[in-house]
Image (cartoon, grey):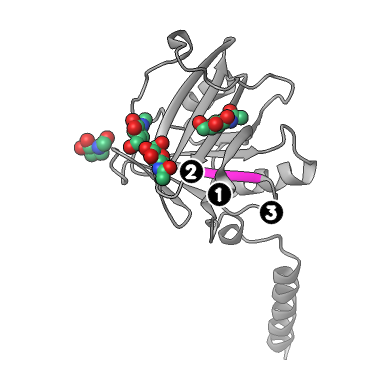
Amino acid sequence: MFFAVCAIALLCWMSAVSHSAPPACEDLVRPLDQLDPHHLEGKWALVAGSLSHPPHLEKFKKRDSASVNFSTNDTYISYTRSIRLDNKCQYNTYNISLEGSSFSYDGTDKSNFSANLVHTTCQDCLLMRFNVESGKRLHFYLFSRRRELEQSEVEEFRAQVECLKIPPPVVMDPTKELCPEETAGDPAAKTEEKTEGQKD
Ligand SMILES: *[C@@H]1O[C@H](CO)[C@@H](O)[C@H](O)[C@H]1NC(C)=O
Ligand SMILES: *[C@@H]1O[C@H](CO)[C@@H](O)[C@H](O)[C@H]1NC(C)=O
Ligand SMILES: *[C@@H]1O[C@H](CO)[C@@H](O)[C@H](O)[C@H]1NC(C)=O
Ligand SMILES: *[C@@H]1O[C@H](CO)[C@@H](O)[C@H](O)[C@H]1NC(C)=O
């Protein structure tokens, strides 16, 4: 009798918990299921990010701002990443292929470096997960058309970061200027670093 009551109480408790529980991690960090490449087009500001490895995270914190600008046509997708650091802008351009919501980088072994878009409830955001060194390192970046997000949107990102078991996110300072569009014929503004792990 005592056992039966306990079992029923436990069942009730379990169903109460599952109803009130926040979204499960598998749901929070699920890949974006569909993507219209044209949605990517244009400029996105980095609003927050987290990286699995502390030394990379420390380097990341030194950035004043960062943005990506995607261009697409019927055949190709490319993007230029700009990072403002110590009042200088660095630009790198990458050609990518899209498979569903995953990116592979032209000329790079897909198993070493890839990225995919992750679902987010933020409408004008782009949430990118980079899998570096065959997935040993994880970089997770939230971009938006806006420079600053609502508190609830930042909270969702924090929960996603927690699910991935990486350090708490660094939120970018929205008052720091983004890099201007890269101007052709300004070699001083361009860096040619194209080593592995520099894509993100
Ligand atoms: C698409 O973009 C690529 C790379 O920028 C370019 O070489 C190609 O001509 C473009 N194709 C069309 C159909 O515009
Ligand atoms: C991207 O692809 C275009 C067209 O094939 C090519 O001209 C350009 O050099 C490529 N850029 C990079 C960074 O690989
Ligand atoms: C990918 O990783 C393998 C083994 O770690 C290495 O041999 C290969 O050169 C790497 N490829 C690229 C494109 O970095
Ligand atoms: C983004 O890149 C495209 C193609 O290179 C360029 O035409 C456009 O002006 C850029 N936009 C911004 C905001 O930098």
Q: What type is the residue that disc 3 sits on?
A: Thr
Residue 77, horizontal then vertical, whole percent: 44, 43
| Residue that label 1 marks | 38
| Residue that label 3 marks | 121
Residue 179, horizontal then vertical, whole percent: 60, 20
Q: Residue at x 72, y 41 (%)?
A: 154
3D distance between C-alphas at marks 2 and 3 = 24 Å
Q: Residue at x 57, y 54 (%)?
A: 29
**Labels 1, 3: front one:** 1
Highlighted range, magenta:
125-129
Ligand 1 in which quarter: top left
Q: What type is the residue that disc 2 sits on?
A: Thr
N-term mark: 1 or 2: 1
Horizontal side, residue 137 vs residue 64: left or right: left
Query: Is residue 95 visible in the rendered structure shown here?
Result: no
The secondary element bearing badge 2 is classed as strand
